[in-house]
Image (cartoon, helix red, strand yellow):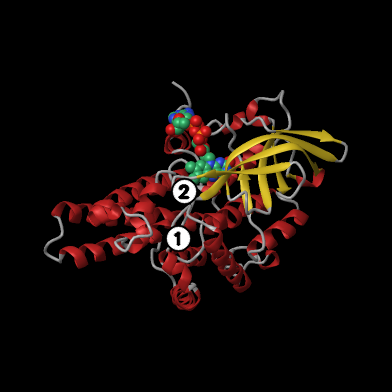
Amino acid sequence: MDFRFSEKEEAFRQEVRRWLGENVPREWLEYDAGLWEENEETWKISREFQRKLGQKGWLAPAYPREYGGSQMSHMERLVLAEELAYNRAPVSIEVEISVNWVGPALMLFGSDEQKKKYLTEVARGEALFCLGYSEPNAGSDLASLQTRAVEDGDYYVINGQKTWCSFAHYAKYCWLGARTDPDAPKHRGISMFVLDMDTPGITVRPLINLLDCHSFNEVFFDDVRVPKSALIGQKNNGWFQLVMALDFERSLIGTAAANQRIIEDLVQYAIDNQGKNGVDPILKDELAQLAVETEVLRMMCYRIAWMYSKEIHPSYESSMSLLFSSELLRHLANVGMRVLGHYSELDRGTKWTVASARALRTYLSCLSIGVGGGSNEIQRNIVAMRGLGLPRQQ
Ligand SMILES: Cc1cc2nc3c(=O)[nH]c(=O)nc-3n(C[C@H](O)[C@H](O)[C@H](O)COP(=O)(O)OP(=O)(O)OC[C@H]3O[C@@H](n4cnc5c(N)ncnc54)[C@H](O)[C@@H]3O)c2cc1C
């Protein structure tokens, strides 16, 4: 594997950097919204920025042109993802869900008509998806989901409840897993649908997260009638589609660059406030360790981007990367709290707050990384079974 980027890719990195320098809104950087911290105001800024990226063909850069993308290589997509993350552009999980998790699944399993409609809207920044997977009694054991879709003439009628649906209150569409054959073994009776969130019978109720923000929701389906054209791919083949979409979800490629930026900020803070010779040696040691682990994560991200470029589907590799990155972020957040000392405990709103309370907010939000997309225990199970070939049960 050649680790160097080509001249064209390096030139593209400079172009992206320049463009971000001119286009990331100042209010956004001043507010400094972290993960799962959206509010009405920041949401407006980020959606506007995303539409601008979409118009430039940079929101879904690797999508084919016919679906609103720029048909860039996956290495160029990686370069763009790194720069967006490092420069803290207003592009977060909501874009990942639509562009990089649901989009590629639709690319594989959707009809031509479905692809044209949904992918184009997503690539232009006009539509967001939410994920209708988890239920009160089906999280890690997702194949136990009980939301039903029953055929009725030209329609499916959907009844059930989903939970932890991120951004369902903003989403135009839901990528939904529902049971279409209750008598089949649980993995074989599921189908995937795309639902318009405005369909009568859908109720969205907020769930407030640890940061006191409204990022996820419960979603109820009461006799929701959708045309049969809402079915994606083959009926009862949904589990396969869902697992593929989860692999896409676990293969974030910009995370190492986001971590690098956090480490750089912490190092700068430590130097500014404790002096080059005064930084606690234990913290120095930990920051060095974090820098090493971030480089390991970067290699995992590059490997996944390379796999995409060779049209190899990342499976356990995605789980490995998500597991490693979530544990790394928790470590990073812990060290961040110690570097800032007692200042780290202050939230926004006092004159003593340091860097918009980013350390505190990362510390709180990182608890959910390592649960969303499947908990770390589940990722370990996948690496053990799919990666190492260990048996499912003793
Ligand atoms: C920030 C965030 C965003 C989310 N967004 C969405 C979304 O948009 N759409 C959606 O559908 N869901 C979403 N989720 C839900 C997420 O997918 C589930 O929380 C996750 O799959 C775990 O399911 P659970 O909460 O039911 O926990 P459970 O499955 O009840 O697990 C509880 C504990 O038991 C452990 N455990 C369970 N089974 C095993 C096993 N076989 N081996 C070892 N340990 C096991 C788990 O690791 C966990 O520690 C989100 C979650 C978070 C935190």
Q: Position of residue 266 (x, y in %)?
A: 27, 61
Tell me which amino acid carries mark 1: Ala
Query: Looking at the image, which is closer to me, 280 or 15?
Result: 280
Query: Looking at the image, which is closer to me, 268 or 296?
Result: 268
Q: Position of residue 221 (x, y in %)?
A: 71, 38
299 left or right, relative to 292: right
Q: Are marks 1 and 2 in contact (CB under 8 Å)?
A: no
Residue identified by numbered label 1: 33
Tell me which amino acid carries mark 2: Asp
Outermost residue, top direction?
394
Q: Position of residue 26 (x, y in %)?
A: 46, 73
Q: Residues within 10 Å of mark 2 (few under 14, many from 20)?
A: few
Residue positioned 38% across, 53% down in the render: 361
Residue positioned 43% across, 68% down in the render: 29
Outermost residue, right direction?
153
Marks 1 and 2, the one that precedes in the sequence? 1
Residue identified by numbered label 2: 212
Residue positioned 59% across, 57% down in the render: 99
| Residue 26 visible to the viewer | yes
* Quarter that holds the C terminus: top left
Q: Is residue 4 above or below residue 109?
A: below
